[in-house]
Image: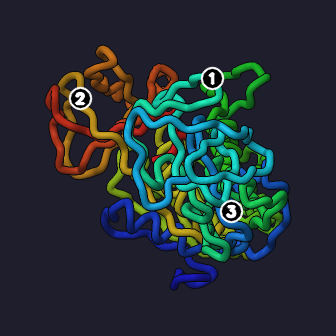
Amino acid sequence: MNAHVPAADACSEGPSLVDIDTACARAAAYADPIAETETVAVHGAGGRTLAEDVSAGVAMPAFDQSAMDGYAVALGDTMLPAGTRLPVVGRIPAGEAAVPLSPGHAVRVFTGAPLPAEADAVLMQEHGWRDGDDLVLHRMLRSGDNIRRRGEDIERGDSLLSWGVRLDARHVALLSAQGRSAVAVLRRPRVAVISTGSELIQPGSSLVGPSVYDSNRPMVMTLAAQAGLDVVDGGWVRDDPDALAAILQEVSTQCDLVVTTGGASVGEEDHSAPAVARAGGACETLRIALKPGKPAVVGRIGAAAYLGLPGNPVAALVSWLILGGAVVAALEGRPFRRRPGCPMPAASRFERRPGRTEFAPGRLVGDGGSPAVEILGRGGSARLRPLVEADGLVEIHPLHAPVEAGDVILFHPFRDGFAV
């Protein structure tokens, strides 16, 4: 493991609130970086973690080329004033070989076309006009105008990407432009998601008595899949620490991370921490300066990291985005950096008590020129409808209380991939 954690048969409870960064560090400390790698097609590497250092095999551009549709000219040490007339002696489309060019002449070229060795400027086609076989300049032309020189972006041998980068479309484009068709990446982290609670009924069955449908496990499984993980359905367990311990022992041998929802606090019916201990694991119950999501259990069972999330849906969502993001980053051997959020004005007053960072569903209101965010946080962390009606999550500083209309708060749009 990459940090000091409790003894293998111990689960402890922190005596006071810890800040979010400390909670993330404690959760991540139980995760060992994945060592296994595999080779995948570059076009399918988005969302994967790079498992090699990449250097440039070719210069970019690979040759001197035109940056515009226009005319290549050999100037030498001179400038050509407006009104200059040059005979056009050839034509070079992109993908075809360059033709020779003599001083006092021009060659028709197109964007990306190779330039004659003698060319040192390109006149944009809008800055000249054709008079038969001649080109007449509308503007002065200087050496270097509208030319992309070989290697001005990347030289052969340049370091491009480092091991541990989470690849996205930008990196895929760069790798492809370097001629790479395959790339080494880490094996996807494997996570098992288990829901706990005797009150839960699985979707597809009829509600009986004071029961509720299990929504947390499908939600967290979806979030984990969207984060690029291989997801194992660990099923549902009643409030029975022995039954939970048995399942924890089983799935911990198959996965890099085990996640449970519900039972993460320290009440008589909160069985996450006792079950981890009975499964031979180590854990600690955190009280985080976070709303919702104050209680969480972080630990390790065998070789798998463990994360116990609260049972209320919004709390489970927020806890996964923060603590789960930190653990996944540790599994992938990369630093965890929370996204900063977009500063936006609050649309109306929002009463709250200071002391904890608060996340709440938020909806964009107002016109496109001056939008604000309406906080939909009333009703507690068990409500799902505000999540569906929201455009993202607002983040409120621990000392910002109350929030007045017009106060600047942070907004994390869901379109950014459910990341905070």
**Sequence-earlier tag: 1 or 3:** 3
Q: Disc 1 residue type?
A: Gly
Tell me: 1 left or right of 315: right
Element assignment for label 3: loop
**Quadrant in the picture for the N terminus:** bottom right
Q: Mark 2 points at which residue?
A: 346
Corner quadrant of residue 226: top right
Find residue 60 and report its horizontal and vertical position in percent: 64, 60
Which scheme is used to colour this image of the protein? rainbow
**Sequence-earlier tag: 1 or 2:** 1
Element assignment for label 1: loop
Q: How crowded is mark 2: few (under 14 residues within 10 Å), some or many (20 or more)?
A: many
Residue drawn at x 35%, y 25% as measured from the top left: 376
Above or below 362: residue 296: below
Find residue 145 and report its horizontal and vertical position in percent: 46, 49
Q: Name the residue under label 3.
A: 49
